[in-house]
Amino acid sequence: MTDFNSIVADILPGLVQLRHELHAHPEIRFQEQWTSDRISEFLAHAGIPHTRGHARGTGIVATVAGASATTVVLRADIDALEIGERTGAPYASQIAGRMHACGHDGHIACLCGAALALARLAETSPLPNTVKFVFQPGEELGAGGRYIVEEGLIDGASAAFALHAWPGLPVGVFALKSGPVMASADWFRITITGRGCHGADPAAGIDPVVVAAQIVIALQTIVSREIDPQNPAVVTIGKIESGAANNVIPETAVLEGSYRALDMRVRDHMTEAVGRISRSIAAAHRATAEVVFGDDYYIPLVNDAAMTDFARKTIVETLGPNAVVEIPRPAMASEDFAFYLEKVPGSFLVFGMGEAKPLHSPYFNFNDDAIPHAVRVLVALAMQFRG
């Protein structure tokens, strides 16, 4: 372990520098070309073989071969958010309206550190497992993990793990939970078509705004009256558009929203219900409703119980008994690592940022003090797993 600690201490300054470079050059989903180039440069300098162009063009998969065919997948997401940065950091975003507000710059640095550390360990003795390092684009609203899986990039793997930064959790502490951890997410757009007319003569038209208002209210009954209250679910209308003048009944109204669930059966029921309720209410008022569902959906993230137990024991052995806490309950936010876990048993863990600002805040900044702890845990998961 002394040699490994020396490796981590040696590479840490370079990882912090890398993280700051990435933070200054944020790129949103599937546009992460500079980011991909920088990751590839880091891996090439370390002599780590990797392939590029995955998951719609910017994804990277690196490999450090082991003594067995057993393969462990470690993943980092690489995209930024469409948020203007207000941290005031000397390495703040150089791109207006873009920033790493969810810690993906730190995730990249931690995974690069794990790859470099494992490559150095492999120079002295073969690793027990082959390790794949997936640098995945489009986690934010792009469901990029689905493309990684569909390309067959994790086929044949025995285990998969990912870490995510978590404000409010102490630095050096990891939180985990078996079973459902994060929710599915589906997006929809409802276009209601009526008949426009003068606002002074509503009987001459069919008012899509009134129809839209009733649909907004009725969609909430999916959760309150069609879903078992012990199965969490959420329906949200986030956008309403209609009309151009206050004295004209418009031709159309558009609603955009999302729904979330922790269970696939609940998710499927909600898909049917959104369409049924919208079309039925529109028809009752002589209007029509076209319901379109988005392609970039997310499924519930479910941690494998055995893999989560393995991760818990591994963290305790690596960092001590106080380094692990339980996630108290699932979150209704979504995460596309769920697609990996549908294919390969594994676990999604969160690790502490201390008193950092909230994720997706213009003031969030990844805590560099967390990097060595994350590198140690990633390396231990890859080294200690036995298929």
Image: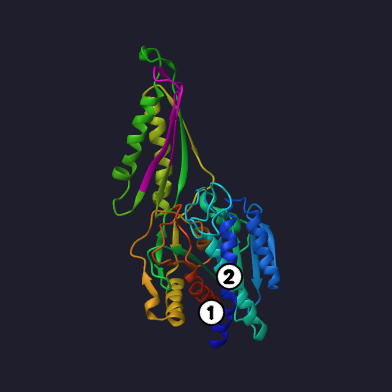
Residue 247 in the image: state x and y as whole percent: 39, 17
Q: Which dot marks residue 15?
A: 2
Query: Which residue, given by chain and number where applicable, does mark 1 sit on?
Result: 386
Q: Is residue 211 above or below residue 125?
A: above
Total marks in image: 2
Looking at the picture, tell me which residue is in the foreground, 136 or 341. Answer: 136
Q: Secondary structure at mark 2?
A: helix
Residue 301 in the image: state x and y as whole percent: 45, 59
Q: Earlier in the sequence, mark 1 or mark 2?
A: 2
Q: Which dot marks residue 287?
A: none
Viewer can see residue 67: no
Residue 290 in the image: state x and y as whole percent: 48, 31
Q: Residue, x 35% and y 38% (percent of image)?
A: 219
Residue 245 part of the magenta segment:
yes
Q: Identify the magenta region.
A: 234-257
Of the residues shown, which amino acid type is indicated by label 2? Leu
Give the Cα distance between marks 1 and 2: 28 Å
